[in-house]
Image (cartoon, rainbow, N blue to C red):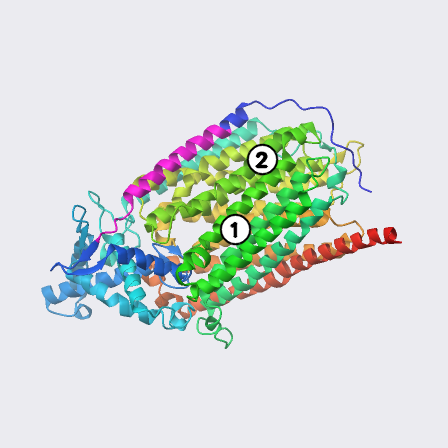
Amino acid sequence: MHAAALPPTGEETELSPWWGRTVWIVLIVGLAGLLFISALAYRDAPPTPAQVVDESGQVLFTGQDVRGGQAVFLKYGLMNNGSIWGHGAYLGPDYAAETLHQMGQYAAAALAAREFHKPLAELDTTQKEAAQAGAASLLKVNRYDPAADTLTFIAAQAATWKAQQPYWTDYLRHPETNGGLRPDAITDPAELHRLAAFITWAAWASVANRPDAVYSYTNNFPYDPSVGNTPAAGAVLWSALSFLVLLGGIGGVLLVLGRFDYLGWTTEDKSYHLHPRLLEGAASPGQKALVKFFIVVTGLFLVQTLVGGAAAHYRADPGSFYGFQLESIFPSNLVRTWHLQSAIFWIATAYVAAALFLARSLRRDEPKSMAAWTHFLFVAFAIVIGGSMLGEWAGMWGKMGGLWFWFGNQGWEYLELGRAWQYLLIVGLIVWFAMIWTLARPRDAANPQAKPLARLFLWASLAIPVFYLPAVFYGAETNFTVVDLWRFWIVHLWVEGFFEFFATTVVALTFFQMGITKRNVALRVIYMDAILFFAGGMLGTGHHWYFSGQGHLNMAVSALVSALEVVPLTLLTLDAWDFVRTTREGKTQSGEQLHVPHKWTFYFLMSVGFWNFLGAGVFGFLINTPIVSYFETGTQLTPNHGHASLMGVFGMLALALTVFVLRQVTSDKNWPGIEKYVKVAFWGTNLGLLMMVVMSLFPSGILQTWDVLQHGYWHARSVAFTHTTRAFIIEWLRLPGDLVFIIFGSIPITIAAIKTYLGMRADAARAKAPAAH
């Protein structure tokens, strides 16, 4: 029996109300600034002209062709093959960059023939540079007439347009050179015509100067000196100034922490009041009903790692999957879609279920309907997860007809699930919040001391469904810049802002409920982290929009503010050690050594701190400055940051919560048989992820970014680079880390969840057996 006592009844002094007020001030100011920049995106987005004509006035394609081509791009999952303006996948090319480079070659060839009467390839260096400089000057001229809503293409641009449909038709035909798309992925001439129009429009917007500006709609992205695309002056200036903000932010916070040493998880007397319900395996019927969620969590985690390994293999061996033509059943863009969606689903499901489990601990009694609503929520989540993933497969194979956007593959990276599934997910999250509200209402709290924490927990929970709503603010044909705006309200703001706040609240409430931290300590940690998260994370969302059609104001604000995002991540490394030190140094009120049975929960939380600093902090800041982002966006440095932060931070936290629940519903007698799998999973996930980063993702990203600097962005994203021997070797070095992660990470934690569920069922059956006699 663990030493335990109920939480103290004596109330702590109330914190200053300025803690909460400061959070609201930072949040409101940040949201106001973000909404202002969002409004500017509508104004600054590259125009989609009603028609594009050649110099003789003949219509080449229309604005409806462009919008329809974007829908084709999404319908067939091409954003999970290549990218537009650096946003998308990394197996294929950046479609706009490839077309832009061709446009430059056509223009330079025309000038070479006219000025030097030779083919471009036969010019000497001086002549070739002159031809390319002349071509760049021609392409930089913006020939869009807003009054007539007409864009005029010069001869070279018109020739580029005419070459696009056969070029991309051929590209989509060959899986071995297009990153593993299914053979003849698109064959309808009308769809190919519209797709070519969309890609050509995106290439034009990449090079044509904004009105009254000396840089393009995409701030001169992608880097391609042959068409005059080099970094805009602002990219250099704001990058330099962001370092001042970073150093000032770290210095200021460290000064505050040094002055007020009570800001942290530790307490001066290091004596704790342990809560038996959260320490001795006690779980209510409603809490036990939540365990099946973690079967889904670990099962999806295993699926994610398997399809992730397949996606990586498409880079290392694009011709075949160990002799089998995998793309004929599971093409690479589908595999990558499932990799992203399963990651989001298993992590979010872990948070949702753990929050309900924790909320129940706030009440003495359990509502009679909790188990029934838990079963309902489980079915709803299963329908959304299963239905959306099957719909993505059917949509990419063209089996959904006109319903592809609603029930198939919506196509936007990270938000691929069809619109109908998104609405169902929002309904599910609202039901989830209603359950949280029922369980965690401050007036029903068993311990009056928990009321302030319960209120913060409810606010954090409410933010999850509310800030997912921007996911439905756009359609398949909405301007790409506008969609990218709202997409990153989800990918960055929802995940890295409000989910961070929610996660901090969950961890703090868990610590308090377990009795290993005092209420005011937990409150200060939540408030402090919220202030820091929202100060940098709100306006910092804009660092994703540097080159997707927004203006210089966004670049200036986002570069400076997003530098502050590193500050709370640095502090979390201190929290990481506090998690473990708390359990090692703490004493109970009777003076006994503190014994907390959630050892592996704390170890996973410690790994969250490590990966938050390395993945989100170091690797995130590396690519967030405008000048670095200009050269690296869409290279392997992006998934290097993505893997280390999404899996390392949010994934490890989800595993920490999973292990917490598994331990909580398992008796001391049964736990050793499960703990051995949890131990292996901890080391397997962390070592496997580290191997992926160190041996493959980071060196591959550095090598690819170097190729951008040497040959231009289009080249580094083409098979001219990705199919080189050196690139293939680095891709194969991903295999050891993947194997460790799968075999010693995802498989053991899945076994642990299954054994926990079966053991819980067996214990329940044994408990009923005597009553039957």
Crowd class of label 2 (few under 14; some 14 to 19; many from 20; radius 10 Å): many
For the N terminus, which image quadrant? top right
- The front one of 597 and 259 is 597
Q: Which residues are magenta?
A: 23-50
Q: Is residue 480 above or below residue 363?
A: below
**In this orientation, does residue 89 appear?**
no
Q: Residue at x 59, y 60 (%)?
A: 302
Judge left or right: residue 623 versus residue 599. Answer: left
- What amino acid is at disc 2? Leu
Judge left or right: residue 213 versus residue 428. Answer: left
- What amino acid is at disc 1? Leu
Residue that mark 2 sits on: 458
Q: Position of residue 447 (x, y in %)?
A: 70, 30
Q: Position of residue 20 (x, y in %)?
A: 53, 27
Marks 1 and 2 close (CB-CB < 8 Å): no
- Distance from disc 1 to disc 2, alpha carbons, whole Å, reads 24 Å
Q: Nearer the viewer, mark 1 or mark 2?
A: 2
- The front one of 324 and 386 is 386
Q: Is residue 619 magenta?
A: no
Residue 646: which numbered mark, if any? Answer: 1
